[in-house]
Image: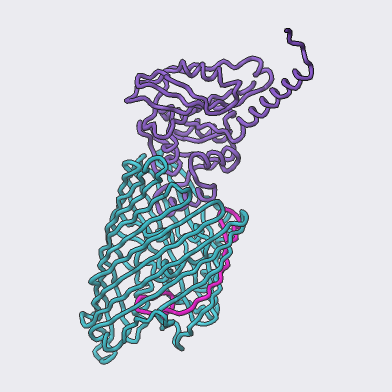
Amino acid sequence: MTTLWNPTKSSAALLAVAALLSYAQQHAFAGDIKIVANPSVRADSITPAELRSVFLEDRRSLDDGSHVEPVLAKGGAAHEAFLRQYVGKSDDDLRTYYRTLVFTGTGSMPKFLDSDAEIINYVSRTKGAVGYVSIDFPSNGVKVLSISRAGAGFARQLVTRVEPEYPETLQRLQIGGTVRLIVTISAKGSVEGVKLLGGNPMLAEPAIKAVKQWVYFPGPSRSMLEVSIPFIPK
Amino acid sequence: MRRGIVPLALVCLCAGATMLRAQEFKLFDRKVQIHGFASQGFVYTDQNNWLTMHSNQGSAAFTDFGANVSMGLSDRLRIGAQFYDRNLGNLGDWHPSLDWAFADYRIKPWFGIRGGNVKTVIGLYNDTQDYEFLNTFALLPQSVYALDMRDANIAHAGGDLYGNIPLGHRRGTLSYTVYGGWRWDSYYGGYPYALRKTIAPINLTSNGGPQYGGDLRWQTPLSGLLVGGSRMNQQDEGKGTFVPFWKPSAGSIPYWERTRQYWLNQFYGKYSRGPLNLASEYRRTYIDAIDFNDTSNSQIDVRSWYVSGSYRLSKHLELGSYYSHYAMTARYGGILGKAFPPRIDTTLPQNHIYDKVISARIDLNRFWNVKVEGHFMDGYGDGPYPDGFYPGDNPGGFKPNTNALVVRTGWNF
């Protein structure tokens, strides 16, 4: 009739939760990146195809007319993750590609910088610069571009952004990470639906709750965006 | 003396210049970039002299370098220019050329236009064949990218339309280039050199004509797989002088020749996955020409292909190999037809070159490499469309097989 306190079972459950949280935390940080841009770039989001064409120098401006120029890291986990996810070339292949552009006169050599700090610093003071850094790296002086789902066809600008509540307990336990969501936006600009793509499940709930309150500029039709919400313990 | 000192100086320059980096500065608030490259080679052959060098004694007369400056005038408009200079045996002779110089206006990713002196896009490597640092090999497969015949297709004075068209999710991307313009051969290229070295030496003072064509390539949904095709049509006209061997007392008289048909088809594929690179190309060049002041004609048909593979073992070492196949037929009419029988048997060594190659590329750093390469060649293909072996450089006659050692170092910034 009554449930008896079972210290062995409770300890095991706590250990399992701690292990899960630890795993989720580590997993969320491994190779997670965010796209950063100089504030002169008007768009708040960019499609993977647009991002690829910016970094392959197929385009030097976005559809809204904003000038863009790529900035890359010389190496590291964020660099590898970015090339794998958005460019589809290895570091060697990409450098060969840039040299081909340079020596056939069809493009220029982009900036390659040593660290996230250098990238943020350069992007913050260079008109049109677009780069990438680790998700947990502070992005002062730059704007973070969200990634639209491929096939969305156009970028949606955010009008109202509500920040998620960071659960105090998780923050105290230094548990952070990134929640990745697919957001469906109506033509009028309201958020119609939010789907969890990945990230720490404990942080998903406040992230989804916040994103549901976001409002975008009206667009020609319904669209979908991929949004990354970082939770960085202080 | 000069020929010996200059390569040595360039080797020293290569070694010292690794300290240099690309230059970037601002002009009228626009970024200007300066880049350059240089390479120095050494070739030793055990039999025939190759690529107009005295290679069977070992030759370092294999140097090239270039530099470019470019800037974006707006998000859509870029301008730039590059000079290029080379000395390859008896070719190039240190005469610099304007390699490319053009304005490029890119309206959309799927549509751009460029005009000026533009490198011609044919196959995988035509427009980048001078940049050894982009490839595993010291020499690209000579059946398709012959060093001595570089001038024929390297660039055109005219314009290109180009763009990339994404085909949608999991369908890949199509890239196209359509071009038209004018070809100008250097006096120091392989074809004028071949004519100067015939039994009735012809001094070809000008050679060129209109060229037009296109390239279409598909970056397939299979990651790393690219396939494509190129086509070029041209009309070539050469003018110069020659001394009739049957009546030398007549002195130098005008000479002209022109093509009635001149086209090239090329098909190619490339697959890259991690450290592995595989490539293959097939090219057919057909030339139907009126020669010797309208007294003769010739039909030359060159079919060439190669298969190559390379594997990067480490950051500093890449190994590669290729098989390069060159086969040529030629038929003559008029006076030439009476003097020369047709060359239609491609199994004869004078009508083919089958080159087996092994290569190692050592990257000393990101900007400086050294390549060591062995070539094992069957045949010498000394036809009217030359491909590395010239009778004038081998006065004692040709041997059927030639092995070559090529060592080349290159630097770029």
Can residue A143 be seen here? The reply is no
Residue A142 locus on image (x, y percent): 50, 28
Up-down: is B149 above or below B180?
A: below
Up-down: is B323 above or below B83?
A: below
| Residue found at x 37% / y 66% | B283
Location of residue A152 by image quarter: top left
| Residue found at x 55% / y 56% | B276
| Left or right: residue A12 compared with residue B395 | right
Q: Tell me if residue B365 is in the magenta stretch.
A: yes
Q: Colour of chain A?
A: purple
Can residue A23 be seen here? The reply is yes
Location of residue A230 by image quarter: top right
Residue B17 locus on image (x, y percent): 56, 57
**Residue span colored magenta:** B361-390
| Residue found at x 41% / y 28% | A43
What letter labels the chain drawn in cyan? Answer: B
Farthest-out residue, top: A1
In the foreground, A6 or B90: A6
Location of residue A198 by image quarter: top right
| Residue found at x 40% / y 40% | B169
Residue B87 locus on image (x, y percent): 45, 70
